[in-house]
Image (cartoon, helix red, strand yellow):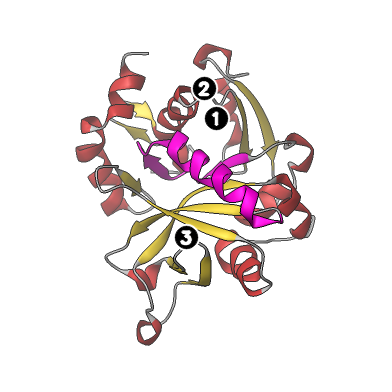
Amino acid sequence: MTLERPKPMLPVAGRPAIEYTVAWLRHHGIRDIAMNLHHKPDVVRAHFGDGARFGVHIRYSLESEILGTAGGVRRLIDFFDEPFVVVYGDVLTDVDLGALIDFHQARGARAGRPHMTLLLYHAPNPESCGIIALDGEGRATRFVEKPPPDDIFSDLANAGVQVMEPGLIELIPPDTFYDFGHDLIPRLVAEGWPVFGFPMPPDAYLIDFGTPEKYARAQAEWPRTAVYRMAAGA
């Protein structure tokens, strides 16, 4: 399915999946978007152009070699001068992004240092996710990416959507493969940097369509979401 296009450009309910993410971001007031490209980058650029047709401005960052989820953000360090949202390209969600951002900003006054807030969901199979334990204030006390079955301490999992402060980017080594789940988030928690978790409301929808089975699910389920209707009517 991805021989001729990158995964985020796979069609869901008749539109490239990432088009819904752009509509979701725009709906929540985000107009400046950076897209990280590697496989078949021209397919993305040909569809979105500069973003004007979709009501946003898009900057592209082309990786000749994969740098990982965090390494891709590090390469765009000059793009970020205020808190920003990271969304994985194979995630579809209709969660209230404004509520996530408000939660992040409210924790900022108490954080004392640059902080990060992760959108979380209750995972039916925690051993296949990055899972997190929270204290009473919603601050992470432990984070493990894909723990072994005998070390499952939570079912709250990283959803692939997060809000970050620019000051954290300096902690990501440049020109190096570096992953949020495997590298940066565990390091932040271990070193005492403030990482918070925002459990997704039960009426919100989220799917990572990174497998053929979940991609088929997305085709069936996504048309019932508010973001689908919003994008289809745009």
Can you tell which mark lies on residue 138?
3
Q: CA distance from mark 2 to mark 3?
A: 39 Å
The quadrant where residue 14 appears? top left
| Residue type of the residue flagged with mark 3 | Gly
Image vertical order of residue 47 relative to residue 205, above or below? above
| Residue type of the residue flagged with mark 1 | Val
CB-based contact (under 8 Å), mark 2 and mark 1: yes
Q: Is residue 220 left or right of residue 69?
A: left
Image position, residue 28 (x, y; %)? 47, 27
In this rendered view, identify the residue nearer to me: 127 or 6.
Answer: 127
CB-based contact (under 8 Å), mark 3 and mark 1: no
| Residue type of the residue flagged with mark 2 | His
The quadrant where residue 191 appears? bottom right
Q: Which residues are magenta?
A: 84-113
Image position, residue 163 (x, y; %)? 57, 45
Residue 3 in view, yes or no: no
- The kind of secondary structure element at disc 3 is loop
Q: Is residue 127 left or right of residue 165?
A: left
Within 10 Å of the Cα at label 1, are there few (<14), some (14-19), or many (20+) other Cα atoms? Answer: many
